[in-house]
Amino acid sequence: FSVVVVLNLSMNLYKITHTGERPYPCDTCGKSFSHSSYLYHLSMHMRIHTGEKPYCCETCGKRFSIKRSLARHITAHTGEKPYCCETCGKSFSAKNSLSYHITTHSGEKPYSCEICRKCFGQSSALYLHKKTHTGEKPYHCDICGKSFRQAGHLSRHKKTHTGEKPYSCETCGKSFSQSNFSCCFHRINTHLRLQLVS
């Protein structure tokens, strides 16, 4: 590479970064990517369409499409929470969870939707919000074909087909298909209410 070619490449990347131009599209859904590392990002993105999940948890066998998702999941088994809020001392297993939590103290919402001007504390929240305007639902159920905006919503939906109920009440053993929130709601409304009455 000559100096001129390298400078031209650098200038093009600089322009793309500052103009917001995204010249590299996904052939399947049209989502665009902005810079030369797009091949990496595109390969990650394509896993949404292919369903490929190459990263496997050795403890429970759950699979992930992104390595950092596996790393975050592993902390659920270890109970490790290395990210601590300097304001209140609350700890988190994932760095982005801490980042989001910090905005609850500051009230800062630096990411705004250019369509409706709604503001968000995290870029990921803005990204998900934008799908409400575009109608984009890239996560498809391979059993019934229903589509979802978020991978977590698809995962929760799939449990309706499998009958899987991985969350159980510590008091009575009743099982739930959806998160510990359902389990917690059950405990408050069933067991705690009974304790208050008796």
Image (cartoon, grey):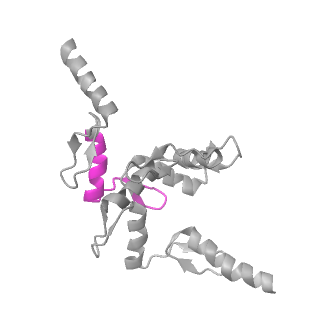
Residue that sits furthest to the front in the current view: 116
Give the mark count.
0
Q: Which residue is drawn at 55% across and 72% down?
A: 167
Q: Position of residue 187 (x, y in %)?
A: 66, 77
Residue that sits furthest to the bottom in the current view: 198
Residue 161 appears in the rendering? yes
Q: Where is residue 100 in the image (x, y as percent from the top left)?
A: 55, 48
Quadrant containing the C terminus is bottom right
Q: Is residue 41 magenta?
A: yes
Query: Is 71 positioned to the left or the right of 140 in the image?
Result: right
Residue that sits furthest to the top in the current view: 3
Specify the quadrant of the image occupied by residue 17: top left
Write the start and end of the magenta stretch as one range.
Answer: 39-63
Q: Which of 109 and 76 is in front in this view?
A: 109
Q: Residue at x 79, y 81 (%)?
A: 196
Q: Does the magenta stretch include residue 151?
A: no
Q: Where is residue 171 in the image (x, y as percent from the top left)?
A: 68, 78
Q: Residue at x 62, y 78 (%)?
A: 186
Q: Position of residue 121 (x, y in %)?
A: 52, 48
Q: Nearer the viewer, residue 193 or 143?
A: 193
Query: Is 67 positioned to the left or the right of 43 in the image?
Result: right
Vertical relation: 5 (above or below) 144: above
